[in-house]
């Protein structure tokens, strides 16, 4: 296939995914009279919403790369592409998996009350299905997998990548505990009834899961693109 057609196809897919994510974010920003979003922290206290913003920004960066390629060429965008690859490896892929896996484990494990399973923004009947938070989490993962299939993810230093993954997970958990201790806002209400030790155990558990998902992304990339272009140290 001609390089020009490949570029046009990748650009079109990136633009489509970016547009869907922007539309989803716009919906959540427009939600009114929804108590969880009206409390301290707004929608930005929920990991899936923070991740939605992160992945949308990631694809926005790739749209910029795609659209400017005919003008400046790939070498001129090497720095931005390396940065986006780091965002994918350290943040977007592991945090997306963390969001999906932890929620699924809690819900289907019976930890969350059935009534809490309905605590999602009201979605109009005529709205796209991806506005449903439960659907949008899966859509985000599908978009990332499609991107990894189209564009070779170049993993750089494993040490830096893991440091970024651990740091972001720890910062988010600190944010959750800050809201609970100083603002009396429980992002995940079931945690309020847990003993203090079990609450604290959530921090290392989430960090370990994030590290596992980092390695999962690296392994997947190595299978999609062999040999993987990276410098693991």
Image (cartoon, rainbow, N blue to C red):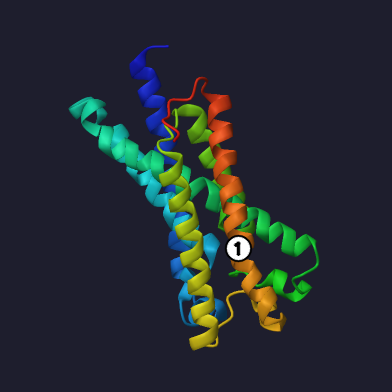
User: Looking at the rendering, which quadrant does residue 155 occupy?
Assistant: top left
Quadrant where the C terminus is found in the figure:
top left
232 or 1, which lies in front? Answer: 232
Q: Residues within 10 Å of mark 1 (few under 14, many from 20)?
A: some
Q: Position of residue 68 (x, y in %)?
A: 24, 33
Look at the picture and state if 41 lies above or below 23. Answer: below
* Residue 75 found in image quarter: top left
> Looking at the image, how many numbered discs can be counted on the residues?
1
Q: x%, y% of residue 19? A: 42, 47
Q: Residue furthest front?
A: 233
The residue at the point 55 percent across, 82 percent down is: 180
Which of 2/74 is in front?
Answer: 74
Relative to 33, residue 82 above or below: above
Q: Position of residue 217 (x, y in %)?
A: 55, 39
The residue drawn where x is 36% and y is 25% is 8
State whether residue 161 appears in this view. Answer: yes
Q: Is residue 126 visible?
A: no
Location of mark 1 (residue): 204
What percent of the width, then of the height, locates residue 97? 60, 50
- On the picture, is 82 further left or further right than 76? right
Side of 73 where 56 appears, left or right: right
From what the image shows, is residue 223 above or below residue 15?
above
Closer to the camera in the image, 25 or 228: 228
Q: What residue lies at 35% left-to-right and 45% top-to-bottom?
A: 60
For the N terminus, the image quarter is top left
Residue at 68% from the left image edge and 77% from the top image edge: 197
**Which residue sits furthest top?**
1
Q: Secondary structure at mark 1?
A: helix
């Amino acid at each position: 296939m001609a390089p020009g057609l490949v570029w046009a196809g990748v650009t079109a897919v990136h633009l489509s995914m970016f547009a869907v994510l922007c539309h989803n974010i716009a919906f959540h920003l427009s939600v009114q009279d929804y108590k969880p979003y009206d409390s301290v922290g707004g929608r930005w206290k929920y990991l899936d919403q923070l991740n939605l913003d992160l992945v949308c920004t990631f694809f926005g960066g790739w749209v910029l790369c795609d659209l400017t390629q005919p003008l400046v060429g790939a070498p001129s965008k090497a720095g931005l592409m390396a940065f986006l690859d780091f965002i994918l490896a350290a943040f977007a892929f592991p945090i997306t998996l963390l969001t999906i896996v932890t929620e699924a484990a809690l819900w289907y494990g019976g930890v969350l009350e059935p009534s809490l399973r309905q605590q999602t923004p009201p979605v109009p009947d005529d709205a796209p299905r991806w506005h449903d938070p439960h659907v949008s989490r899966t859509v985000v993962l599908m978009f990332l997998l499609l991107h990894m299939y189209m564009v070779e993810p170049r993993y750089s230093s494993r040490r830096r990548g893991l440091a970024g993954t651990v740091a972001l997970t720890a910062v988010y958990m600190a944010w959750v505990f800050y809201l609970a201790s100083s603002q009396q806002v429980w992002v995940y209400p079931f945690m309020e009834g847990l003993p203090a030790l079990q609450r604290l155990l959530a921090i290392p558990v989430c960090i370990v899961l994030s590290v596992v998902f980092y390695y999962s992304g690296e392994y997947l990339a190595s299978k999609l693109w062999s040999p993987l272009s990276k410098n693991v140290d």
